[in-house]
Image (cartoon, rainbow, N blue to C red):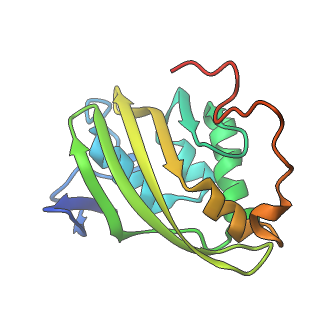
Amino acid sequence: MSVHLDVIEGDVSRQSSKSRVPLLGDRTDAKTLLDAKTLLLDLLAVIPDGEKSAAFFAEDGVLELPFLPTRHQGHAAIKQFYNYVGGTLYPDFRIKPADTKVLIDTPDRVFAEYMVHARAASTGRLIHLLFTGLLVAENGKIKLLRETLNTAANAQALNPNGAADLPPPEGEIFSVPPDYAS
């Protein structure tokens, strides 16, 4: 039996798929399309498994984050990114339902915040990292997931000397790539 995550008055709980929309991998009817909130909650339940995570995205779906390469497009890139996060950066990276709060919920868009409590493989430091995510759904798949997080805290967790290990800034600083378009 699959498990579905549901948010009720800000709390996330698990329910049997017999009473809710099944997880993506359990869908057999192409007419059963997942809404944005269901897609996000089901995705968060499988991260950092790259194969399972990428399956929620459209073929040309995009994951954007403000660190590492900022844009991951298509199943192969998304799979590789999530496997890197869980395999190299934070082996115990998980998002618990209790640490997830949906703030805006429409059929094709959802905005939520979710907390990760993980230990950095490179330093052994424990980080409590808050993410926000805007998910855009199209035809029952994720077209775009744009996440934000505190990149300074992430650097503190991952680098032996924290943010001091980052290179000094140049004369011009971009918070996104220079060719970024919204």
**Where residue 168 sits: x, y (%)?**
85, 48
Above or below for 148 versus 123: above
Q: Is residue 68 left or right of residue 75?
A: right
Where residue 39 appears, as percent x and y from the top left, is 36, 45
Outermost residue toward the front in this view: 171
Report the side of 123 relative to 33 (left or right): right
> Could you tell me residue 171's position as x and y percent?
81, 32
Q: Quadrant of residue 173?
A: top right
Viewer-side residue, 115 vs 156 = 156
62 w.r.t. 80: above or below: above
Q: How many marks?
A: 0
Quarter residue 28 falls in: top left
Front position in the image: 157 or 88? 157
The residue located at (57%, 37%) in the rendering is 64
| Whether residue 48 can be seen here | yes
> Which residue does the image show at 42% across and 46% down from the upper left?
133
Instruction: Pinpoint residue 130: horizontal percent, then vertical percent.
Output: 47, 62
Most foreground residue, 155 or 96: 155
In the image, taking residue 95 as reference, residue 125 lies left or right, namely right
Q: Quadrant of the N terminus?
A: bottom left
